[in-house]
Image (cartoon, rainbow, N blue to C red):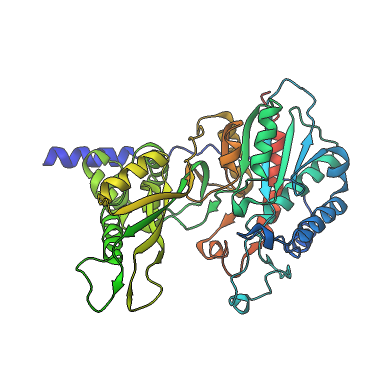
Amino acid sequence: MLLLTAIVLFRTWQFKPAAITPIPKANIAVNSQQIAEHLSQAVQFKTISKEHRSEIDYQQFSAFISWLAQIYPDVHQQLELKKFNDYTLLFHWRGSEAHNKAILLSAHYDVVPVIAGTESLWSHPPFAGTIDSEHVWGRGTLDDKGSAITLMEAITHLLAQDYRPKRDVYIALTHDEEIGSKYGAAAIADYFADAAIALEWSLDEGSFVLDGMIPGVEPKVASINVTEKGYLTLELIAHAKGGHSSMPPSETAVSILAQAIVNLKNAPVPGGLEGISAQIYDKMARHMPFSSRVLFANKWLFGSLIENKMSEMNSANAMLRTTTAPTMLSGSEKSNVLPIEAKAKVNFRIHPRDSVESIIAYVNAVIDDPRIEIGIVEQFEPSPVSSSESPAFKLLANAAQSIHGDLVVVPGLTVGGTDSRRYQLVADDSYRFLPMTLTSQELTGFHGTNEKISIENLTKAVQFYNYLIKQSDQNL
Ligand SMILES: [Zn+2]
């Protein structure tokens, strides 16, 4: 027992953060008020993506594109512009040395709708682009017009200094990320593939610098995400005899379906702290208090304890495994009629260790009831895991630290879907990271109410992209 305690303590003592090599702070002068003003104007275009494409007001998209040309004339004159399906823009900045691999920086300018009935909860109207002393308010400021505008500002800034990159730089502004990116990022990826343009890396949204968001971790954490989860919606249909509800059989379509859903709930898809999930927590846990560090330093002993604890927290659970979420249900049309079928939709977010096929096999095994028919509604495989050892990852880490100060940098996993799932097909590595520092309070604006971004974050994002493009020319 004494020996065991000694081993546990020794390993905990060894389990400390890697020494941080100080990164010189970059000092890049930009006009913060003007950036805020430009984002404010961008927010006022209601470039809203809707599930039914026929309901989308494309005039707003055209107007946004015209406005962009007017506000960023240098980018439009000095870079070549290609359009895909009318509304997705790809700017090509030709490098001075053709043999280098290109890079792609991407943002989307479509936004999600404001849920009807929630408008009055906004402190400022969602499409007014209100600027106060600290923030620009409105739908899209965080997701993802803030990034689109700061990219344009950074290129404009570099052009004004007569900067010319050594490698080809592509800037994509896409128009349908919120509804699956089929005509935007997918078209760009097809173009790169057809033209045999090799990308060393791509950078897109998908994470942030997290301030106080990881329980127990004091320093800010830059999560540079190297992969994203897949997506699968299954429809479960239970069949049974219908009839009057006054003399029901012991099992009805509803009870058969309900049992299947309960079975899925009781059998979460197996997961665990290995692979990318282990990498993430290995870096972060070194900054946690002793009580947590002792566990993570001794996974050989406390592995299942850690996994059980993490599984109880929704956000940590999503890092460990493919998640299961029943989202839609229907039965009979009338309260006194037994349905001949009852239906449910269940949405899975597939961890990179699983696949669409493995999840379907798992669901079949768990439900194990021939009266349930299982159909695929929508599917997308999880992304391959990009390198967290590559020069590009180090470059992103340095850029984040140089602009945002001392940070813990970890590779991460995006639990939603982004345009990167398209770019990964044509880039050696795809990274998902927005150079902005967010608290959990600010994160609630994401697809939610009172979306806003601080002017400080906008300033830093311009400085980050500026630094990143210049530094990516080093070592070529
Ligand atoms: Zn987004």
Given residues 22 and 93, the one toward you in this image is 93
> Total number of numbered labels?
0
Quadrant of the snapshot with the N terminus: top left
Residue 403 seen in render: yes
Residue 107 x/y as whole percent: 67, 48
In the rendered view, tell whether residue 45 sits above or below residue 408. below
Q: Is residue 21 left or right of residue 203?
A: left
Residue 198 x/y as whole percent: 66, 26
Given residues 227 and 423, the one toward you in this image is 423
Q: Is residue 268 left or right of residue 140?
A: left
Q: Is residue 105 left or right of residue 331?
A: right
Given residues 467 and 431, the one toward you in this image is 431
Quadrant of the snapshot with the C terminus: top right
In the rendered view, tell whether residue 118 sits above or below residue 16. below
In the rendered view, tell whether residue 32 sits above or below residue 11. below
Picture residue at 31% right of the left edge, 44% below the top: 362
Residue 74 x/y as whole percent: 87, 44
Picture residue at 54% right of the left edge, 29% below the top: 390
